[in-house]
Amino acid sequence: DTAVSQTPKYLVTQMGNDKSIKCEQNLGHDTMYWYKQDSKKFLKIMFSYNNKELIINETVPNRFSPKSPDKAHLNLHINSLELGDSAVYFCASSQEHEAFFGQGTRLTVV
Amino acid sequence: AQSVAQPEDQVNVAEGNPLTVKCTYSVSGNPYLFWYVQYPNRGLQFLLKYITGDNLVKGSYGFEAEFNKSQTSFHLKKPSALVSDSALYFCAVRVTYNFNKFYFGSGTKLNVKP
C-alpha cells in the first residue's frame, strides 16, 4: 500500500556504468519529482513532471534522463556514472498541496 | 529568487521541554508552507502545512506551527518534546504561481535528550 515506491533502495556501482531508478505512485497525482539529497542533507530538485510532461529541469547534466511512461511512473536513468553522483535520490508526487516522498535510493558510485 | 532558511543546523532540547525549530522564507506571491521530518535512512514524512486561514496549524505527533506573514516565518513547535522526536526537520515552501516546485530549507537536526 506504499503511496510512492522507489526501487532499488540501495545501488552500488562502478564509475562509467549506466543505471536506472524506478518510481511509482498510486495516489493519482498529476505531478512527480526527482530530488537529490547530498551528503550534507541538502535537498535539490532535479526534475518535475506534470501529466507525463517535463516541467522543470534544474540544470542537471545531460547524463541524467527522466522518463515518464504514464503519470503514475517517473524513472530516472543515469549514464556514465561519476563519483559525484553518489547521493540519495528521492522521488515524490503531489497534487494540490503537500508532496509525498518515496523512501529514497542510496546511490554509491565507486 | 525564492528561498527558505533554517538558521539552526541543530537544536538540542531536554525531553519534556518545549521545542522550536525556526524557518523563514522569501518568496514572491502567496506561499504554501510545509514541515517534513526525516528519520535516519528514511524518506521525508509530511508533518503539517499552512495554506490559508488560521495562522496556527496543527499536525502529526503533536507538532504545530505558526505562520507569521509580517516576519515571513513558519516556526515549528511542540509543547513537550519526546526522545523519539529526534530527527532531521525540513521546512518547505511552494508558491501559488508555480505549483511544480517545492523549495526546501537546509534542514535542522533535532536532538531530544532523556
Image: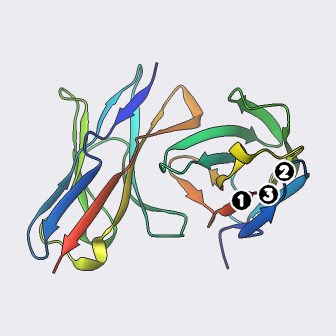
The kind of residue on which mark 1 rests is Thr
Q: Report the residue that reaches farthest toward the left.
A: B17
Please, is residue A65 above or below residue B112 in the view?
A: above
Report the amino acid beneath label 2: Met
The numbered dot on residue A81 is none
Q: Secondary structure at mark 1?
A: strand
Labels 3 and 2 positioned on one and the same chain: yes
Q: Residue at x 61, y 39 (%)?
A: A45
Residue A108 bears which disc, if any?
Answer: 1
- Secondary structure at numbered mark 2: loop
Residue lying at 41% horizontally and 19% vertically, measured from the top left: B28
Q: Earlier in the sequence, mark 1 or mark 3?
A: 3
- Crowding at dot 1, Cα within 10 Å, few <14 / some 14-19 / many 20+, comes out as some
Q: Chain of mark 3?
A: A
The CA span between labels 1 and 2 is: 10 Å
Q: Is residue B52 above or below residue B10?
A: above
* Mark 1 or mark 2, earlier in chain: 2
Q: Which residue is mark 2?
A: A15
Q: Read off the residue under disc 3.
A: A72
Can you tell which quarter of the image residue A57 is in? top right
Q: Is residue A14 left or right of residue B58?
A: right
Chain letter for the residue marked with disc 2 in the picture: A
